[in-house]
Image (tube, rainbow, N blue to C red):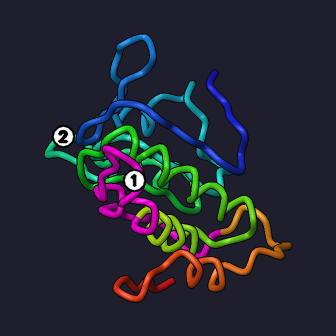
Amino acid sequence: RLETNHELFVFNGHGNSGLVALPSGNYISSDDLEEDADIDVFSSNLIALWFSCYSAIGSSSYSSMAEASVNEGSKAAFGYEVSVNDTGAYYFGGYLIEALANGATLNQANAYATAALFTIMPYIEGLSSSPQYNEIFGSGSTRLITDTTFNLDSRIAQLSNSNYSVSS
């Protein structure tokens, strides 16, 4: 029986519409999450983060991985609508998790990570803006923690330049 931390689930790997690749090279589908009784990852999960290509996109056969997470009990889930490069996903994911760990809602963390990505993009070779193309399922106001000293608006203002605005 597969069980995880019930607050945060993170998948980082290859994906496609409604599918993700496991380290073994085997794929699992969103149907596997929704139908397999041995996979009880999301029944009391707060936030599921799918750092894989097309993890917010379903197909004619499958719902998206992010959507399946919410269908199975996650309060909120994040996934990409496009193919993302490793560098972009690495930086975006780091900023997203930093904000979540400091009390931001998933919507706020997404805004912060987007602002951070655009701020550092000119300085990191190979960095793509594709991680900004994502979708949040469930309640974007979900937080991992409620006690925070992290001033997200201030951090976004520090990161954002005058030509780029972010809404949380």
When asked about the image quadrant of residue 75, the answer is bottom right
Decide which of 75, 96 is in the foreground and name it.
96
Residue positioned 38% across, 45% down in the render? 65
Side of 28 where 139 appears, left or right: right
Side of 34 where 125 appears, left or right: left
Q: Measured from the top left, where is residue 24 in percent x and y?
A: 43, 11
Inspect the magenta stretch and tell me whether residue 84 lies in it. no
When asked about the image quadrant of residue 120, the answer is bottom left
Q: Residue furthest front?
A: 123
Instruction: Tell me which amino acid carries mark 1.
Output: Gly
Circle 2 or circle 1, nearest the eye: 1
Residue positioned 35% across, 56% down in the render? 131
Instruction: Tell me which amino acid carries mark 2.
Output: Ser
Q: Which residue is mark 2?
A: 61
Q: Classify mark 2: residues with Cα within 10 Å, few (<14), some (14-19) or many (20+).
A: few
The secondary element bearing badge 2 is classed as loop
Q: Which residue is mark 1?
A: 79
Q: Write down the region rendered in magenta.
A: 118-142
When asked about the image quadrant of residue 23, the answer is top left
Decide which of 138, 11 is in the foreground and name it.
11
Q: Measured from the top left, where is residue 34 in percent x and y?
A: 43, 40
Q: Is residue 4 above or below residue 75?
A: above
Side of 128 where 124 appears, left or right: right
Side of 139 where 124 appears, left or right: left
Residue positioned 83% across, 76% down in the render? 149
The secondary element bearing badge 1 is classed as strand
Q: Measured from the top left, where is residue 39 in percent x and y?
A: 55, 29
Residue positioned 59% across, 80% down in the render? 158
Q: Is residue 4 above or below residue 65?
A: above
